[in-house]
Image (cartoon, rainbow, N blue to C red):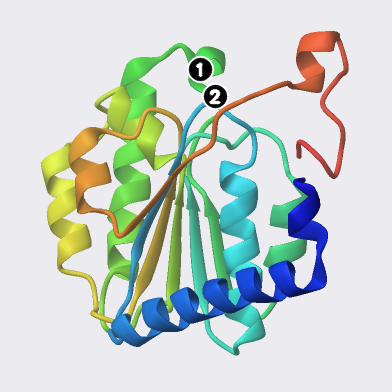
Amino acid sequence: MREEAKEPQHHAARMERKRAAMEERKRRAQQDRGVLLVLTGAGKGKSSSAWGMVARTLGHGRSAGVMQFIKGTEATGEEVFFREQPGVDWRVMGEGFTWETADRERDVAAARAAWEAARYWLRPDGPALVVLDELCLALRYEYLELGEVLDDLSQRPCAQHVVITGRHAPKPLIDAADTVSAIEPVRHAFEAGVRAQPGVEW
C-alpha cells in the first residue's frame, strides 16, 4: 500500500468517492425481478456458492428446490443438512460422475428425468430459488437439448431466481444469464495428494 493511502485524510476522501460511486450504482438499479445465475469454471466452490444462496433464501422465509444432475452416489454434508430444513425440496437424480457410470444411455435417461422434474419448479407455484447443480455438464455432454432448457428457463415466473452450476457453461447459457462467475483454480490440495475431506469437499 502506498504511504499516502494510509493517511487519514487521503483514506477518508477515497472512501467517500467509493461511497458516492456505490450510491450511484444503487440509484440506477431499480428493477425487482428474478435473476439467472451461472457459476462455472474449473475451480472449486461452484456448488458451495449455490448452497450459500439456498441458506440465504431460507433465512428470508422463502423456499428452495435443488436438483443435482450428475452427483449422486454419495451423501454429502449439504444434502444431509438441507434435507432436514423446512422449505427445501432436494432431489438427487444423477447416478454418479460420468466417469463412474460410463453408460451414456443411462446418463441421458437420468438427465432427462431430472429435467422433467425440475421444469415443474419453473412455474408460478414453484420455489423462490431453484438450483440446477451440474446442469452445465449435462448440457456439455448433450444429455439434454440446450434450446429446450433455455426456453423453459425463459418462461419461468418473473420473480423466481435460478442458479446453474458446472464446468463448461455453454455460451448461449452465459449470454442468457444475468450474473456469471467463472471460478478458476489456483491450487487444490488434491493435487498435493490430500484426500477429499468431509466438510470441505463433501
Label 1 and label 2: CA atoms lie apart by 7 Å
69 w.r.t. 137: above or below? below
Rendered location of residue 75, percent (x, y): 73, 43
- Tell me the kind of residue under disc 1: Thr
Q: Is residue 101 left or right of residue 2?
A: left
Residue lying at 58% horizontally and 66% vertically, measured from the top left? 53
Residue 13 occupies which quadrant of the picture?
bottom right
Tell me the quadrant of the picture where the C terminus can be found. top right
Rendered location of residue 92, percent (x, y): 54, 48
Rendered location of residue 23, percent (x, y): 46, 83
Residue lying at 59% horizontally and 67% vertically, measured from the top left? 54
User: Which of the two discs, 1 and 2, sits closer to the camera?
Assistant: 2
Residue lying at 34% horizontally and 34% vertically, measured from the top left? 169
Secondary element at image label 1: helix
Q: Is residue 12 left or right of residue 193?
A: left
Rendered location of residue 190, percent (x, y): 78, 17
Residue ID for mark 1: 101
- Tell me the kind of residue under disc 2: Phe
Secondary element at image label 2: loop
Which mark identifies residue 97? 2
Q: Residues within 10 Å of mark 2 (few under 14, many from 20)?
A: some
Task: Please report contact status of discs 1 and 2: CB closer than 8 Å, yes or no.
Answer: yes
